[in-house]
Amino acid sequence: MTQRYQFRPIFLSILKFAVACGLLFTVAIAAYVKFIIIPELPDTQSLTNIQFQTPLSVFSEDGLLIAKFGEKKRIPISYADIPTLQVNAFLAAEDKDFFNHNGVDFMGLMRAATQLILTGKKKQGGSTITMQVARNFFLSNEKTYLRKLREILLSFVIEQQLSKQEILSLYLNKIYLGHRSYGIAAAADVYYGKKLAELTLAQKAMIAGLPKAPSAFNPITNPERAIVRRDYVLHRLYDLNYIQQDQLESALAEPISANLQAASYELEASYVAEMVRDELYKTYGEDTYTTGMQVYTTINARQQKAATTAVRDGLHQYDKRHGYRGVLGRIDLSNLESNSPGAALLAAYENIGETVPAVVISLAEKSITVLNKNDHFIDIAWDDLKWAWPYINENRQGKEPKQAADILSAGDIIRIRQKPGGPSFELAQVPSVSGSLVAINPSNGALAALVGGYAFSVSKFNLAYQAKRQPGSGFKPFLYSAALSKGYTTATLINDAPVVFDDAGLEQQWRPENYSGKFFGPTRLREALTHSRNLVSIRVLRDVGVNYVRNFAVQFGFDPADLPKNLSLSLGSGSSNPYQMATAYSVFANGGFRVKPFFIDRVLSYSGEVLFQAKPLVAPSNNKAARTPSLQSHALIENSPITTTAGLDATEAETYAKAIISPQLNFIVNSLLRDVVKHGTGRRALSLGRTDLAGKTGTTNDQRDAWFNGFHPSLVAVSWVGFDNSQPLGGRETGGKAALPIWMAFMKETLKGVPHVELSQPDGIVGMLIDPDNGFKTGPANPKAIIEYFREENLASIETASPISTSIQSDPQQTIEALF
C-alpha cells in the first residue's frame, strides 16, 4: 500500500509533464497556424470575382456562334441554370452532407486517418466539395499533411465568405471532366451535344461520376468502368431519396449514349474565325485563348450562308462539267450484318463540305441505291448520275455512260450530296478546283460574308484573304477610270488591231490578243470595256502611262508592289485577292469613296466590358460628303477629277471617308460596268431580273483564274475560281462561266426584297446623241444615234473631232504611238 502511494507523485509528475507538453505542442501548433500558415493562405476574396479560363468566342453580327478557340472547353453557367437533379447527382456522388457541414467533414477525415493508421497508405477521402474548391483554386495536388491543413483552413474561410450555392457553382464550373471539358456545361456539350437541361437522368449521373477519376470512369475511353460508376451514382440518388424506384430502374436500363461531339457552331464561317483569331493574337497573345473574350464580327448570317452555298454549288457544277475521278474505295457487302452497317463501313470517311460518304448497295439500269453513315437507304436517279463521264484531264473526258453500271458497282464507296433546294441526292465528289467569295458593305467597308475555300477541313489556306492571284480583266475598270480622269470619254475611239511590243519591262516580244482571237478595228471605250477588248486596254495604258495608272490604282487599295511596271498591267497581270478586289470595287459602289475593310465590330471581355469598338469611316449617302482627297492623292494623281467641298466641320471630317474620284467620273464608270452586265461578258446576270447590277469579269491566261467582280449599290461581291497550283481550268472556263454563276447565286439570295436603285445622274454630267461609228456628236435625224454621257468639260472633244485618231495601220509591228 505504502509502495503504491510512493509511485503516485511520480505518476502525477509524468501526467503533469505530459499535459504541459501537450499544451505546449497545442500552443506551438496554434502559433504556427496563426503566424505562419494563415498569413500565407491565399486571399479567398478573389473567389467572389473569379475569372475562369474560358475560350475565345467568335460570333456573327447577329449573335450566332461561329467558333471557339482555347485549350480548355468551358461554358460557365450560373447556379440558377443548373438543374436540381444535376446538383443532387453531384452531392450524392461527392458530398451528401454539403448543405449541413461547415466546410469540413470531420468524420470523413477520421475515416481517412484510421485507414492510414491501419494500412500505412494515404488514400483519397474525407474531402468535401468546399475542400475541393480550396484545392482546385488555390493549392496543388501534392498529398502532404501541410497541404491538407491549408485545405481545411481555407475551407473554413470560404464557408464564411461565400454561400453554399456560390461554392457549388464554383465547383461545378471548375472541375475537370475529361476530354478537355471543364465544368458540367462543357461536359454535357462534349459528351452528348446537349445543354444541361436536356440530359437524361442516366446522362446526369454519368457526368456526376466523372470527378473521382475523369479518365478511369470516362464513357468514351472506358465505358465498362464508366457504367459501373454511373450506376453507383444512380443508387446513391435513390438511397438519398432524390429519385424514385421507377426512375432508378429506367436509368439503369439506359445504355451508354456518350459520343465525342464535334463543336456545335451555329454558323459556318471558319475562314472568318481564323482571321479573327489571328488578329486578336497579335494584340492579346496567349490571353486570347483563356480570358473568355467575345468577338462580334461584321458577318451577316444570312449572307454568309448564301455565300457558302453559292461557292460550294459553283465548284460542284464546275466539277460535273469535267468528269468523275472515281470511287473512294470498295468493300465486301457481306459485312452488312452488323446492327449499324453504314456507320461501321464508313467510319473512316468524313463528311466534307456538302458531301457525305455512302456505299453502293444495289444498281438498277438507270439508278442506284446507297447506304449512308446514318443507315439510311437513298435512291439516286439517272439524272443525278449521268454527268459522271470519266475524267481524263481538264479538257477531255472518257466515254459517255449509258447506264449506272458504266459508272459504279455494288460495294463502291462514293460521295453524295443533297441537291440545293430539294430533298433528292446526287453522285458527287469533293471538288479538285478551289473557289472563294467576299462580300463587303460599300458604305463602311464591313465584311458581310467570306468563304475562303470549299471547306476549312480540306484546306485552311484562305484563298479569299491570303492568296495572290492575277485579277485579269477585273483590273480594267481602274485603267479606264484613270484614262477618263485624263480626258478620255466613253465615246473615244481606240483601234482594236494586231500589235507587237518590244517593251523593256517585258522579258520577250509580246503579241497580245483578244480572248476571241478576233480584231474589231476602231472601238469606242464603252464597247471596249463591255466586251473586254484586250488590245484596246493595252493601247489606253500606253497612252495614259504605266506610272499614272499604277498610282491611280493605289488609291483604290492596291499594293504598289503587286502592280507590274509594264504594259501587261492593262490585262491584270498584277496580284490581288477577292478581299482586295471587293475593297477596290467598293469605291464604284459607294459613289467614289475609299473605305477601309474590317471584319471585327467589337471585342468584349468575359464580363461584358467593351475592349474594342470599330469606328469605320463611312461613305456619305449624299453629296454633302467630304470630297477632299488626301495630300497623297493630290501628289499622286495630278490633274485628277477629284473635287473638294468646303463647309465640313471637324466631326464630319473624322466621320466620312475621303473621295478618290468625283461623282461625275463615278457615274460614268458605273454606267460602263452596268453595260457589262446588260450587253457584255456579264450578261448572264440579267437572269436575276435586276437593272441595278454592275461588274466586270476577269479571266487570266489559259483560264488559270476566273473572276467576277460585281456590285449593287448596297453590296459588293467578288467571286473567284481556280486551282491552288494555278493549272488551267480548261477550255472556255472564263470568268463569265466559272465565277459569275457563284456571284449570281449569292446576289439572288441576298438581294431578295432589296428595292431597285436607279443610277442617279449628278450635276456636271450631260447626255448627248452621238454617232456610234465615230463617237462624234450627232442629231436625232441620224438613225444610228445613241445617247452617251459626258462630263461637261469633255463636251468640246465630241463637237468636231475625235480626240484620238481612228486610222488603222496594216503593219502589226507599228508602234503604239502610230495607233493613236
Image (spheres, grey):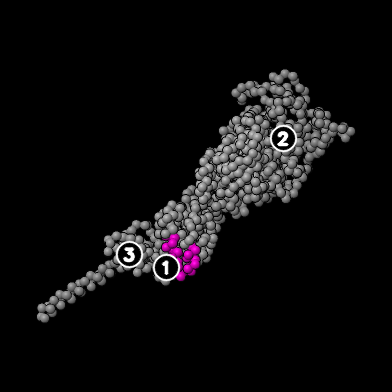
Residue 241 belongs to magenta span? yes
Q: Residues within 10 Å of mark 2 (few under 14, many from 20)?
A: many
User: Left or right: where does residue 284 sit relative to residue 306?
Assistant: left
Q: Residue at x 67, y 40 (%)?
A: 383
* Residue type indicated by callout 2: Thr
Report the quarter where the C terminus lies: top right
Q: Residues within 10 Å of mark 3 (few under 14, many from 20)?
A: some
Q: Residue at x 83, y 35 (%)?
A: 786
Is the Cβ of the residue at disc 1 closer than 8 Å to that at disc 3? Answer: no
Examine the rendered structure and indicate whether residue 696 appears above or below residue 267. Answer: above
Question: Mark 1 — residue?
Answer: 96
User: Left or right: where does residue 469 sit relative to residue 490?
Assistant: left
* In front of the other: 660 or 35: 35
Q: Residue at x 66, y 47 (%)?
A: 422
Question: Mark 2 — residue?
Answer: 681
Q: Residue at x 35, y 67 (%)?
A: 108
Dot 2: element: loop
* Residue type indicated by callout 3: Ala
Q: CA distance from mark 1 to mark 2?
A: 76 Å
**Which residue extends farthest right?**
781
Q: Earlier in the sequence, mark 1 or mark 3?
A: 1
* In front of the other: 458 or 307: 458
Q: Earlier in the sequence, mark 1 or mark 2?
A: 1
Is the Cβ of the residue at disc 2 closer than 8 Å to that at disc 3? Answer: no
Q: CA distance from mark 1 to mark 3?
A: 17 Å
* Residue 388: x %, y % from top left: 63, 36
Dot 1: element: loop
Query: What main secondary structure does the magenta stretch of the protein show?
Result: helix
Question: Mark 3 — residue?
Answer: 112
